[in-house]
Amino acid sequence: MSGAHGQEAGRRTEHLFQLDLAESLNEAYAWVTRIQVAQFVGILSRMREEHREAMAMRALHAFALRRPVHELVRLADHFDGRDAVMLMATAALSRPVGEAAELALMQYEAESGGERAPITASIVHDVACQRTAFDVAVFVRVLEQREPTLAKRTVQVFASPGSGRTNLDKALLHTALRDEGCHREADRLLGLTLRAIADSPPGAAGPGGAGEEGEEMADLAGAFQHLSPAGRVLERWVEERLNGSDATEVQRTWELVARLIARRGAGHDALAEHIGRTAQPRHVVKLCALLARGDSASPVKCALVRRYAAGRTSVQDLAVLVTFWHKEPALTRTTRELLTDIVAGAGAGAYGSGADVHDSRVAAEGSRVGAEGARVGAQRAGAGIDGSGAGAERGRAAADGAGRGPDGSAPRSDGSGAVADGSGAVPRTLNELLQLDEWLRVEDADPQCSQMLSHAAAVHVEGRSGADLVTLLDRVVRSRDRTRAADTVGRRLAMAVMRPDADRGRFVDCLRALHDARYSVAVRAACRELSDPSDALTVDAALVADVAGRLHRAGLHKIAWTLLERLLENEQLVTPDDVVEVVGGVLALPLPDAELLLRATVGRWSDVGHRDDAVTALRDAGRREAAEWVIKSLR
């Protein structure tokens, strides 16, 4: 035998890289099947002493593949502990998976008398970490039938962050386990995987290299989406646990889902959408409470789930949601935002209402608007001029800066507090809102919920006709609240008409309806915002001139006059070119008392140089008569 070994000494480790290693070992190492274990152990030692380590490895490999499984288990104690582990690992990884499972079961039984089972643990670890997902699924199925403890341990090792398995591997195993009928272990795998992601430090990279916070969850969701586009695996798993009877498990699921959603990065969040749109209202509230406060706090994600929930079609479910939401201490202060999202309707989408940005400004302006209603008459003496309101309005614009974005610009409102992107989201109908109010009473909601609902409905101008706006304002019970709402309606209408794609005719129709219904606060607010935008450093003079012309032709002469006067008296904002633009529109109407308008505004500018520039611009544009009107006011 030593001669044979001498011939093998000349062979290098290329054996380990041949296409069929088993066949190679069958030819060269057939002797391992006939030799006694004590003699084989001695040969291994001699090979290593003679610097033939690779040959010893091949011999041990052949022994693991060619000897029956039961012999491997029985003879393992005759080897050095490290050789025994390598022997069993080779058998577990290279033999058919059924034999690997049999090996694990027999070794577990052999080690059951001791406190530890190191070789069994090694077999389980090697199979879980190195065999294909389908092999592992078969391995688990065999173990689950005869020794569930080993099946559970295999899944735990596979799911652990130290296994080196990617999220795609885990999604593959989950699919394979369900195919093998191992639903309990498949659920266990998914639960362990999700908890590992939720508990991992922010920014920690997983086996797949996803290092950005939230990317691990996105990677797992993407893997399941790829393997089972219609399966909604994650969503179904969460739903089953939330609807379980074990209160402790439900609580743990709330906390787990909150951490997962909070950790999710940018982009579409299917889990947040599923929870918001389909979970029971009490589950939505508990989840949002965890996202609002506590270890998983993420106000942005709380608002995301809230907006999805607000898009539900059942007004009864919405009433229950509002009732639970308002009673939850962590969410009570955001009930107004929830109602704003509900009013915006399902078409508003996940980011449809923007209530977080805009409604905070509306609430802050409450006291100012209440006082505004009391002093309107005194400010509007004579021809309906609002005095020197531009300066006060500019101060308010600075105060409103708290709602600006990171770049200092405020989002353009579309009437619901939503970003005015022209998406055309359809708000809830007046009948739906009336039904919701009735269901709030049935659900014994706090009366404040109905009051906030009426206000939120009244100030949502996007998609509403003038008649709708009047009807919704009429539903606001308290006079002070109605005044606040009317002011907000006017401002939002003006903000909406400043969009490039806005329907200016609709703006005029809404102002006509509000004027006819004696909501003068709304009309004044619209003129004020349009002529002196609170979120811009410039004014669109062409827009103002066009709207004023439409108002004049619609018979709203005083409103047209007020709008132009508010614009032209603002010498800090209006440029000489703006004056030329407005004068062209005024003379084209023609507007009665156009001369009086210019003399009372541009002619009284305190900045002499600025006023002279306006006169020069008028002359250069061929508007010499208008220039003389401005000069005449100085004589």
Image (cartoon, grey):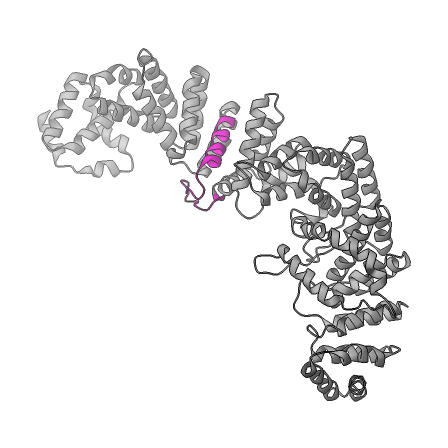
Which residue is located at x 18 percent, y 23 percent? 31
Q: Is residue 497 left or right of residue 116?
A: right
Per the image, is 574 magenta?
no
Which residue is located at x 74 percent, y 88 percent? 619
Q: Is residue 411 visible?
A: no
Between 593 and 547, the one nearer to me in the picture: 593
The x and y percentages for residue 583 are: 79, 79
The x and y percentages for residue 558 are: 87, 69
Between 590 and 369, the one nearer to me in the picture: 369
- Most extreme residue toward the top, as rendered? 113
Q: Is residue 236 left or right of residue 123?
A: right
Q: Height in image: 232 above or below 504?
A: above
Q: Height in image: 245 above or below 114?
A: below
The x and y percentages for residue 256 are: 53, 32
**Which quarter of the rendered picture does the N terminus lie within?**
top left
The x and y percentages for residue 333 are: 67, 41
Image quarter for residue 341?
Answer: top right
Between 519 and 287, the one nearer to me in the picture: 519
Which residue is located at x 21 percent, y 24 percent? 30
Q: Is residue 96 left or right of residue 62?
A: right
**Which quarter of the rendered picture does the C terminus lie within?**
bottom right
Q: Which residues are magenta?
A: 187-215
Per the image, is 191 magenta?
yes
Q: Is residue 31 visible?
A: yes
Image quarter for residue 454?
Answer: top right
Report how many numbered discs are placed on residues in the image: 0
